[in-house]
Image (cartoon, rainbow, N blue to C red):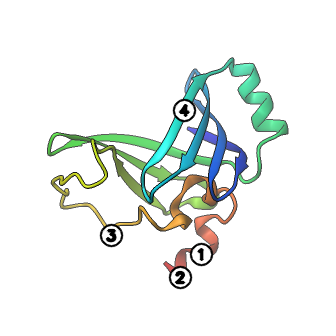
Amino acid sequence: MSQGYLSRDAQSSVRVRICGERADINIKSTRDGIYRLEYEYSIPMEDAQDLMKHVAHRPLVRKKRHIVHFGGKCWEIDEFEDENAGLIVAEVELESVGEDFPRPPWLGREVSTDARYYNSNLSKLPYSVWKDEA
């Protein structure tokens, strides 16, 4: 999976993602802590490739996504590559902000409110630059 950010400010981001044969454009806005508005639309692969090549900020964010089911929840485990190699982040979608859920034994510390871990910020300040400070 490759992601290129067209916009990546503190309040919102616009990204292009290529995953296999699928290409999407995504708009994400930050509101109320970890709650985010998010919109995603399919776009033609050629458009996505052009945007990645000519418009997207560098570095691109590349990662492998693993899906793990635990405690009735679907976890997305992202294993980052290139400038963000060594970083692994687990994410789960909740029904509500305060929802209680079972935490898998492999889960590390909570980083949802640490903006360094946002993919949009990893395209500005990669993990390789700050990992020793984490």
Q: CA distance from mark 1 to mark 2?
A: 5 Å
Identify residue for label 4. 39
Q: Are marks 4 and 2 in contact (CB under 8 Å)?
A: no
Of 75 and 93, nearer the camera is 93
Identify residue for label 3. 109
Decide which of tag 2 and tag 3 comes sooner along the chain. 3
Callout in the foreground (4, 3) = 4
Q: CA distance from mark 1 to mark 4?
A: 30 Å
Q: Secondary structure at mark 4?
A: strand
The label shown at residue 133 is: 2
Decide which of tag 1 and tag 3 comes sooner along the chain. 3
Mark 1 burial class by Cα count in 10 Å: few <14, some 14-19, many 20+: few
Q: Are marks 1 and 2 in contact (CB under 8 Å)?
A: yes
Vertically, is 3 above or below 84? above
Residue type highlighted by circle 1: Trp
Q: CA distance from mark 1 to mark 3?
A: 17 Å
Decide which of tag 4 and tag 2 comes sooner along the chain. 4
